[in-house]
Image (cartoon, rainbow, N blue to C red):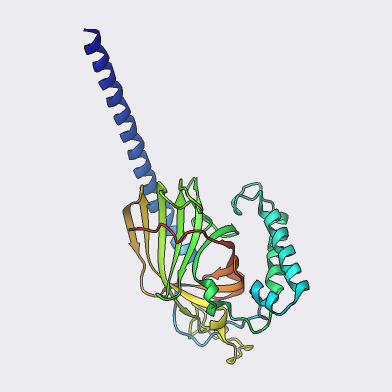
Protein backbone atom coordinates (compact mmCIF):
# COMPACT_ATOMS: atom_id res chain seq x y z
CA UNK A 1 0.00 0.00 0.00
CA UNK A 2 2.78 2.41 0.90
CA UNK A 3 4.66 1.60 -2.32
CA UNK A 4 1.47 2.07 -4.41
CA UNK A 5 0.80 5.40 -2.72
CA UNK A 6 4.38 6.59 -3.35
CA UNK A 7 4.17 5.53 -7.00
CA UNK A 8 0.85 7.33 -7.36
CA UNK A 9 2.31 10.48 -5.78
CA UNK A 10 5.33 10.38 -8.09
CA UNK A 11 3.10 9.97 -11.12
CA UNK A 12 1.00 12.91 -9.98
CA UNK A 13 4.12 15.03 -9.49
CA UNK A 14 5.39 14.14 -12.97
CA UNK A 15 2.00 14.93 -14.43
CA UNK A 16 1.98 18.32 -12.71
CA UNK A 17 5.48 19.06 -14.00
CA UNK A 18 4.49 18.17 -17.54
CA UNK A 19 1.42 20.41 -17.31
CA UNK A 20 3.55 23.24 -15.94
CA UNK A 21 6.14 22.86 -18.69
CA UNK A 22 3.40 22.72 -21.30
CA UNK A 23 1.87 25.88 -19.92
CA UNK A 24 5.24 27.63 -19.98
CA UNK A 25 5.82 26.54 -23.59
CA UNK A 26 2.39 27.80 -24.63
CA UNK A 27 3.12 31.16 -22.98
CA UNK A 28 6.46 31.37 -24.80
CA UNK A 29 4.88 30.54 -28.17
CA UNK A 30 2.07 33.05 -27.71
CA UNK A 31 4.56 35.67 -26.52
CA UNK A 32 6.71 35.07 -29.58
CA UNK A 33 3.68 35.24 -31.85
CA UNK A 34 2.64 38.50 -30.23
CA UNK A 35 6.14 39.86 -30.75
CA UNK A 36 5.96 39.00 -34.44
CA UNK A 37 2.49 40.49 -34.89
CA UNK A 38 3.02 43.60 -32.79
CA UNK A 39 6.70 44.41 -33.10
CA UNK A 40 8.09 43.12 -36.35
CA UNK A 41 5.77 44.86 -38.80
CA UNK A 42 6.65 48.25 -37.33
CA UNK A 43 10.30 47.37 -36.84
CA UNK A 44 10.62 46.04 -40.38
CA UNK A 45 9.23 49.34 -41.57
CA UNK A 46 11.59 51.18 -39.26
CA UNK A 47 14.74 49.65 -40.68
CA UNK A 48 13.74 48.98 -44.27
CA UNK A 49 12.73 51.03 -47.23
CA UNK A 50 11.72 50.28 -50.79
CA UNK A 51 14.13 51.64 -53.32
CA UNK A 52 13.30 53.52 -56.50
CA UNK A 53 15.40 54.75 -59.39
CA UNK A 54 16.82 58.25 -59.37
CA UNK A 55 19.82 60.34 -60.24
CA UNK A 56 20.20 61.49 -56.61
CA UNK A 57 23.48 60.25 -55.22
CA UNK A 58 25.08 60.20 -51.81
CA UNK A 59 28.21 62.30 -51.50
CA UNK A 60 30.74 60.41 -49.38
CA UNK A 61 32.72 62.31 -46.77
CA UNK A 62 36.43 61.77 -46.31
CA UNK A 63 37.44 58.15 -45.83
CA UNK A 64 37.01 57.12 -42.22
CA UNK A 65 38.21 53.53 -42.24
CA UNK A 66 41.33 51.67 -41.22
CA UNK A 67 42.93 48.30 -40.65
CA UNK A 68 45.15 48.17 -37.63
CA UNK A 69 47.46 45.80 -39.51
CA UNK A 70 48.05 48.43 -42.18
CA UNK A 71 49.11 50.86 -39.48
CA UNK A 72 51.57 48.33 -38.06
CA UNK A 73 52.88 47.49 -41.54
CA UNK A 74 53.63 51.15 -42.16
CA UNK A 75 55.47 51.40 -38.82
CA UNK A 76 53.16 54.17 -37.72
CA UNK A 77 53.45 53.52 -34.00
CA UNK A 78 51.72 56.74 -33.04
CA UNK A 79 48.67 55.88 -35.11
CA UNK A 80 48.54 52.36 -33.72
CA UNK A 81 48.73 53.75 -30.18
CA UNK A 82 45.96 56.23 -30.97
CA UNK A 83 43.74 53.42 -32.27
CA UNK A 84 44.31 51.27 -29.19
CA UNK A 85 43.63 54.22 -26.92
CA UNK A 86 40.42 55.11 -28.79
CA UNK A 87 39.15 51.52 -28.52
CA UNK A 88 39.96 51.40 -24.81
CA UNK A 89 38.05 54.62 -24.18
CA UNK A 90 35.06 53.39 -26.17
CA UNK A 91 34.97 50.04 -24.38
CA UNK A 92 35.07 51.80 -21.02
CA UNK A 93 32.32 54.23 -22.03
CA UNK A 94 29.94 51.50 -23.23
CA UNK A 95 30.63 49.03 -20.42
CA UNK A 96 27.54 50.00 -18.40
CA UNK A 97 25.17 50.79 -21.28
CA UNK A 98 23.73 47.29 -21.87
CA UNK A 99 24.91 47.48 -25.50
CA UNK A 100 23.24 50.89 -25.81
CA UNK A 101 19.85 49.66 -24.54
CA UNK A 102 20.06 50.97 -20.97
CA UNK A 103 17.20 53.27 -20.01
CA UNK A 104 19.65 55.07 -17.72
CA UNK A 105 21.81 56.13 -20.65
CA UNK A 106 21.55 59.92 -20.79
CA UNK A 107 21.64 61.96 -24.01
CA UNK A 108 24.98 63.44 -22.95
CA UNK A 109 26.46 59.95 -22.41
CA UNK A 110 25.22 58.77 -25.79
CA UNK A 111 26.58 61.91 -27.42
CA UNK A 112 29.97 61.33 -25.80
CA UNK A 113 30.06 57.73 -27.03
CA UNK A 114 29.12 58.85 -30.53
CA UNK A 115 31.97 61.36 -30.46
CA UNK A 116 34.40 58.66 -29.35
CA UNK A 117 33.26 56.38 -32.16
CA UNK A 118 33.65 59.22 -34.64
CA UNK A 119 37.19 59.75 -33.38
CA UNK A 120 38.05 56.11 -34.02
CA UNK A 121 36.52 56.43 -37.49
CA UNK A 122 38.66 59.46 -38.19
CA UNK A 123 41.89 57.49 -37.78
CA UNK A 124 42.10 56.56 -41.40
CA UNK A 125 44.35 56.12 -44.42
CA UNK A 126 42.71 57.75 -47.46
CA UNK A 127 42.83 54.79 -49.85
CA UNK A 128 41.51 51.96 -47.68
CA UNK A 129 38.42 50.18 -49.11
CA UNK A 130 36.72 48.43 -46.14
CA UNK A 131 33.70 47.18 -48.11
CA UNK A 132 36.07 45.19 -50.33
CA UNK A 133 38.34 43.93 -47.57
CA UNK A 134 38.48 40.18 -46.77
CA UNK A 135 38.36 41.24 -43.12
CA UNK A 136 34.62 41.83 -43.56
CA UNK A 137 33.98 38.08 -43.76
CA UNK A 138 32.59 36.15 -40.81
CA UNK A 139 30.58 36.83 -37.63
CA UNK A 140 30.43 40.14 -35.76
CA UNK A 141 28.87 40.77 -32.34
CA UNK A 142 27.21 44.12 -31.63
CA UNK A 143 28.72 45.69 -28.51
CA UNK A 144 26.93 49.02 -28.81
CA UNK A 145 24.32 50.64 -31.03
CA UNK A 146 21.89 53.54 -30.94
CA UNK A 147 19.45 51.60 -33.14
CA UNK A 148 15.96 50.61 -31.92
CA UNK A 149 14.74 47.01 -31.37
CA UNK A 150 15.19 44.44 -32.76
CA UNK A 151 18.44 45.66 -34.33
CA UNK A 152 19.87 46.32 -30.84
CA UNK A 153 19.33 42.74 -29.72
CA UNK A 154 16.02 43.33 -27.97
CA UNK A 155 12.83 41.45 -28.86
CA UNK A 156 9.92 42.99 -27.00
CA UNK A 157 10.84 42.69 -23.29
CA UNK A 158 13.50 40.10 -24.07
CA UNK A 159 17.15 41.10 -24.38
CA UNK A 160 19.78 39.04 -26.12
CA UNK A 161 22.72 39.19 -28.49
CA UNK A 162 22.67 40.95 -31.85
CA UNK A 163 24.98 39.45 -34.44
CA UNK A 164 25.89 40.12 -38.05
CA UNK A 165 27.28 37.33 -40.22
CA UNK A 166 28.86 38.04 -43.62
CA UNK A 167 29.70 35.48 -46.29
CA UNK A 168 31.79 37.23 -48.94
CA UNK A 169 31.91 34.23 -51.29
CA UNK A 170 28.13 33.78 -51.36
CA UNK A 171 27.35 37.48 -51.24
CA UNK A 172 25.01 36.97 -48.28
CA UNK A 173 24.45 38.81 -45.04
CA UNK A 174 22.53 37.93 -41.87
CA UNK A 175 21.26 39.96 -38.95
CA UNK A 176 20.80 37.54 -36.09
CA UNK A 177 19.26 37.92 -32.63
CA UNK A 178 19.59 35.30 -29.91
CA UNK A 179 17.90 35.18 -26.49
CA UNK A 180 18.92 32.66 -23.83
CA UNK A 181 21.85 31.28 -25.79
CA UNK A 182 25.18 29.87 -24.67
CA UNK A 183 28.69 29.57 -26.04
CA UNK A 184 31.34 32.15 -26.92
CA UNK A 185 28.85 34.47 -28.60
CA UNK A 186 25.76 33.34 -26.61
CA UNK A 187 24.15 32.23 -29.87
CA UNK A 188 24.15 28.44 -29.37
CA UNK A 189 20.97 26.62 -28.31
CA UNK A 190 19.07 29.88 -27.85
CA UNK A 191 15.46 29.42 -26.84
CA UNK A 192 14.38 32.37 -29.00
CA UNK A 193 16.10 33.52 -32.18
CA UNK A 194 15.34 35.79 -35.11
CA UNK A 195 17.39 35.73 -38.32
CA UNK A 196 17.09 38.25 -41.12
CA UNK A 197 18.66 36.95 -44.32
CA UNK A 198 19.83 39.29 -47.05
CA UNK A 199 22.04 39.64 -50.07
CA UNK A 200 24.41 42.53 -50.72
CA UNK A 201 26.16 44.32 -53.53
CA UNK A 202 28.26 47.45 -53.83
CA UNK A 203 26.16 50.59 -53.51
CA UNK A 204 26.07 52.86 -56.56
CA UNK A 205 25.39 55.99 -54.53
CA UNK A 206 21.71 56.33 -55.48
CA UNK A 207 19.52 57.22 -52.50
CA UNK A 208 17.08 54.41 -51.75
CA UNK A 209 14.12 56.76 -51.33
CA UNK A 210 14.96 58.90 -54.35
CA UNK A 211 12.16 60.19 -56.58
CA UNK A 212 12.81 61.24 -60.15
CA UNK A 213 9.94 63.71 -60.03
CA UNK A 214 11.29 65.57 -57.01
CA UNK A 215 13.90 68.15 -57.95
CA UNK A 216 15.08 68.31 -54.32
CA UNK A 217 16.59 64.87 -54.85
CA UNK A 218 19.13 66.32 -57.26
CA UNK A 219 22.40 66.80 -55.40
CA UNK A 220 24.21 69.87 -56.64
CA UNK A 221 27.42 68.60 -54.99
CA UNK A 222 27.29 65.22 -56.72
CA UNK A 223 30.71 63.91 -57.75
CA UNK A 224 30.46 61.01 -60.18
CA UNK A 225 34.09 60.10 -59.51
CA UNK A 226 33.35 58.95 -55.93
CA UNK A 227 33.70 55.19 -55.56
CA UNK A 228 30.73 54.54 -53.25
CA UNK A 229 31.19 50.77 -53.42
CA UNK A 230 34.56 51.03 -51.70
CA UNK A 231 32.88 51.83 -48.38
CA UNK A 232 29.17 51.04 -48.75
CA UNK A 233 26.92 48.09 -49.56
CA UNK A 234 23.31 48.00 -50.59
CA UNK A 235 21.72 45.19 -48.56
CA UNK A 236 18.53 43.66 -49.99
CA UNK A 237 16.40 41.87 -47.41
CA UNK A 238 15.10 38.41 -48.32
CA UNK A 239 13.37 36.91 -45.28
CA UNK A 240 12.96 37.06 -41.51
CA UNK A 241 12.57 33.85 -39.48
CA UNK A 242 11.56 33.55 -35.82
CA UNK A 243 12.38 30.31 -34.00
CA UNK A 244 11.56 28.84 -30.59
CA UNK A 245 14.02 26.26 -29.25
CA UNK A 246 15.65 26.15 -32.71
CA UNK A 247 12.31 25.29 -34.36
CA UNK A 248 11.18 27.87 -36.98
CA UNK A 249 7.63 29.01 -36.24
CA UNK A 250 7.30 32.06 -38.47
CA UNK A 251 8.90 33.36 -41.66
CA UNK A 252 8.26 36.71 -43.31
CA UNK A 253 9.37 37.22 -46.91
CA UNK A 254 10.20 40.80 -47.85
CA UNK A 255 8.96 42.50 -50.99
CA UNK A 256 11.53 42.80 -53.75
CA UNK A 257 13.44 46.07 -53.42
CA UNK A 258 13.31 46.19 -49.62
CA UNK A 259 16.80 47.47 -48.91
CA UNK A 260 19.17 49.37 -46.69
CA UNK A 261 22.67 50.83 -46.92
CA UNK A 262 25.62 49.70 -44.83
CA UNK A 263 28.54 52.13 -44.66
CA UNK A 264 31.70 50.51 -43.34
CA UNK A 265 33.30 53.36 -41.46
CA UNK A 266 35.95 51.42 -39.52
CA UNK A 267 37.45 47.96 -39.94
CA UNK A 268 40.39 46.04 -38.56
CA UNK A 269 41.13 42.47 -37.50
CA UNK A 270 38.80 42.52 -34.49
CA UNK A 271 36.73 45.71 -34.62
CA UNK A 272 34.16 47.07 -37.05
CA UNK A 273 31.91 50.12 -37.16
CA UNK A 274 28.94 50.31 -39.51
CA UNK A 275 26.51 53.14 -40.12
CA UNK A 276 23.30 51.57 -41.37
CA UNK A 277 20.67 53.75 -43.00
CA UNK A 278 17.29 53.60 -44.68
CA UNK A 279 18.25 55.82 -47.57
CA UNK A 280 22.00 56.41 -47.75
CA UNK A 281 21.69 59.87 -46.23
CA UNK A 282 23.79 60.44 -43.15
CA UNK A 283 20.93 61.85 -41.09
CA UNK A 284 19.06 58.53 -40.89
CA UNK A 285 22.06 56.34 -40.01
CA UNK A 286 22.21 54.09 -36.95
CA UNK A 287 25.70 53.28 -35.67
CA UNK A 288 26.89 49.78 -34.78
CA UNK A 289 30.14 49.12 -32.90
CA UNK A 290 31.14 45.45 -33.12
CA UNK A 291 33.80 42.93 -32.21
CA UNK A 292 34.65 39.90 -34.27
CA UNK A 293 32.62 36.86 -33.24
CA UNK A 294 34.03 33.58 -32.10
CA UNK A 295 31.66 31.34 -34.05
CA UNK A 296 29.98 31.31 -37.42
CA UNK A 297 26.47 31.71 -36.11
CA UNK A 298 23.87 29.11 -35.23
CA UNK A 299 21.39 30.42 -37.76
CA UNK A 300 18.21 28.59 -38.72
CA UNK A 301 18.32 25.06 -40.08
Q: Position of residue 74 (x, y in %)?
A: 71, 80
Q: Residue furthest top?
A: 1
Q: Position of residue 296 (x, y in %)?
A: 45, 61
Task: Judge left or right: residue 60 versus residue 295.
Answer: right
Q: Residue furthest right?
A: 78
The residue sitting at 69% across, 76% down in the picture is 71
Task: Judge left or right: residue 282 versus residue 115.
Answer: left
Please say if 151 is above or below 66. above
Q: Can you see residue 32? A: yes
Please say if 68 is above or below 101. below
Q: Can you see residue 66? A: no
Q: Position of residue 213 (x, y in %)?
A: 48, 85
The residue sitting at 36% across, 36% down in the picture is 24
- Front residue of 267 and 237: 267
Quadrant housing the C terminus = bottom left
Please say if 301 is above or below 83. above
The residue sitting at 66% across, 54% down in the picture is 94
Tell me where residue 286 sits by quadrant: bottom right
Quadrant housing the N terminus = top left
- Front residue of 278 and 171: 171
Task: Judge left or right: residue 194 versus residue 275.
Answer: left
Q: Position of residue 205 (x, y in %)?
A: 53, 83
The residue sitting at 32% across, 39% down in the picture is 26
Q: Residue furthest bottom?
A: 225
Numbered disc total: 0
Amino acid sequence: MTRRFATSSNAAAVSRSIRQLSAIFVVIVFTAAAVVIIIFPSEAAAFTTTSSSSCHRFVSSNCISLTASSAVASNNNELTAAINKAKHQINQAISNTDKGRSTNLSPSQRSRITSQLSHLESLCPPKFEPARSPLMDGPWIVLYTDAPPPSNGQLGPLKGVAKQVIDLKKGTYKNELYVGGSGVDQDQNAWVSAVLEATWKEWDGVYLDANDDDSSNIDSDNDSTIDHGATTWRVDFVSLTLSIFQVPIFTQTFQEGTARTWKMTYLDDDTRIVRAGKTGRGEDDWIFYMRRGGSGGAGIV
